[in-house]
Image: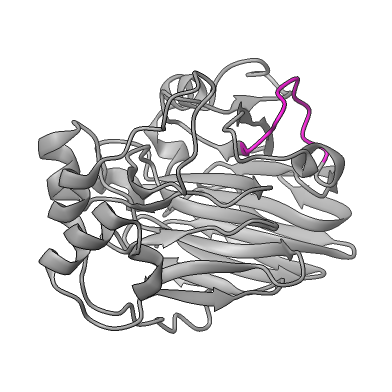
């Protein structure tokens, strides 16, 4: 089976910049360009197959026509496609936010919750992000600090550099800081509860909506422990992510599809008897059962699948 290149769904959130266009080759008329959903079956922005017999069709339309076997046996446990992969360009700080668990999101939002991970692709000097609390706090203190604007005083501010990886379970307060370009691998969800937004206004001139009550329901009040998933970069029920520098060989068995996101450099992808020139910013979907494949060249790759 061939590897299918995907065209992303793009988002123009107010905090975005232009680097996904200039540095990653993402084609979009949006300005700013904040996010490119490079692998997505979410109705808020499905990605599209660029070429081949399904060219121009969305990824969910292709899966429906090709059959569930292209997802692999490990995906039979899911009602919906399990993951979503994004490129994010934060010209400004993102809001401090939290994502709910599956149980809470299903009961309140009608979709699944969101556990995610970040791989830092570039970081301006002095860039940082917020990653959970510095110490345990009470629900009352969280409510007070969201009201009086002092929330960031109790958050863990982490200086970051290219190559850093963060795993963010549902319930973890977090925020991407200005000057960061990030690859995000997450559950297939678009549920976000904003807790603090630096007093910003939206395109309509009004303060952007906050979701304090729901955030208070779902936020983990304990400090976040950074897990070690070695040899993987990240792992949960919904996705496993491996990182590769340079050439590598792997196999795409019948247990799961593979999604390959090239975050640096260029090279060749050999799969299914075909060879494809690959470039930074491109994402490819390999159907389950594609067999052995190779990546050649001076490039960096995120390999995402369900294990």
Left or right of 210 in this view: 275: right
Q: Residue at x 61, y 55 (%)?
A: 183
What is the magenta segment's predominant secondary structure?
Answer: loop
Q: Residue furthest front?
A: 148
Residue stretch rendered in magenta on the structure? 25-35
In front here: 63 or 36?
36
| Residue 254 visible in the current orientation | no
Which one is nearer the viewer's eye here, 90 or 200?
200
Pick the quarter of the image with the C terminus.
bottom left
Using the rendered view, name the quadrant where residue 152 is placed.
bottom left
> Among all residues in the image, which is located at the extreme top?
56
Residue 9 percent across, percent down from the top left: 60, 27
Looking at the picture, how far across and down is residue 38, in whole percent?
A: 61, 38
| Residue 134 coordinates in the image, percent (x, y) | 35, 81
Whether residue 34 appears in magenta in the rendering, the answer is yes
Which quarter of the rendered picture does the N terminus lie within? top right
Identify which residue is drawn at 71% across, 61% down: 301
Instruction: Give the residue drawn at x 50%, y 54%.
Output: 185
> Is residue 166 in sight in this rendering?
yes
* Residue shown at the point (45%, 43%) measured from the top left: 199
Q: Is residue 154 left or right of residue 88?
A: left
Q: How is the image coloured?
A: one colour
Quarter of image, res 209: top left
Q: Is residue 275 above or below residue 171?
A: above
Residue 230 place in picture, x, y as percent: 50, 83
* 196 left or right, relative to 146: right
Image vertical order of residue 189 relative to residue 307, above or below = above
Label count reads 0
In depth, the one of 99 and 261 nearer the eye is 99
Q: Is residue 261 above or below residue 251?
A: above
């Amino acid at each position: 089976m061939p590897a299918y290149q995907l065209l992303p769904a793009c988002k123009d959130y107010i905090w975005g910049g232009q680097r996904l266009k200039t540095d990653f080759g993402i084609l979009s008329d949006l300005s700013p360009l904040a996010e490119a959903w490079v692998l997505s079956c979410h109705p808020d922005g499905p990605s599209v197959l660029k070429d081949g017999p399904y060219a121009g069709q969305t990824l969910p339309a292709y899966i429906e026509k090709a059959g569930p076997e292209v997802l692999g046996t490990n995906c039979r446990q899911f009602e919906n496609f399990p993951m979503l992969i994004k490129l994010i360009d934060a010209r400004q700080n993102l809001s401090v936010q939290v994502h709910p668990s599956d149980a809470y999101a299903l009961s309140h939002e009608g979709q699944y919750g969101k556990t995610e991970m970040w791989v830092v692709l570039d970081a301006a000097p002095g860039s940082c992000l917020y990653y959970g609390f510095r110490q345990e706090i009470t629900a009352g203190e969280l409510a007070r600090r969201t009201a009086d604007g002092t929330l960031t005083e109790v958050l863990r501010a982490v200086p970051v550099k290219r190559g850093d990886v963060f795993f963010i379970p549902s319930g973890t307060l977090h925020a991407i800081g200005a000057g960061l370009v990030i690859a995000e691998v997450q559950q297939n969800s678009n549920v976000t509860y904003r807790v603090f937004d630096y007093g910003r206004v939206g395109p309509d001139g009004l303060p952007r909506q906050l979701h304090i009550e729901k955030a208070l329901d779902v936020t983990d009040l304990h400090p976040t422990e950074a897990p070690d998933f070695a040899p993987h970069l990240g792992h949960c029920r919904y996705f496993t992510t491996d990182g590769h520098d340079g050439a590598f060989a792997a196999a795409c068995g019948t247990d799961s599809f593979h999604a390959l996101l090239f975050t640096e450099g260029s090279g060749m992808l050999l799969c299914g008897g075909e060879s494809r020139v690959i470039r930074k910013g491109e994402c490819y979907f390999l159907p389950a059962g594609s067999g052995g494949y190779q990546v050649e060249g001076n490039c960096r790759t995120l390999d995402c699948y369900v294990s």
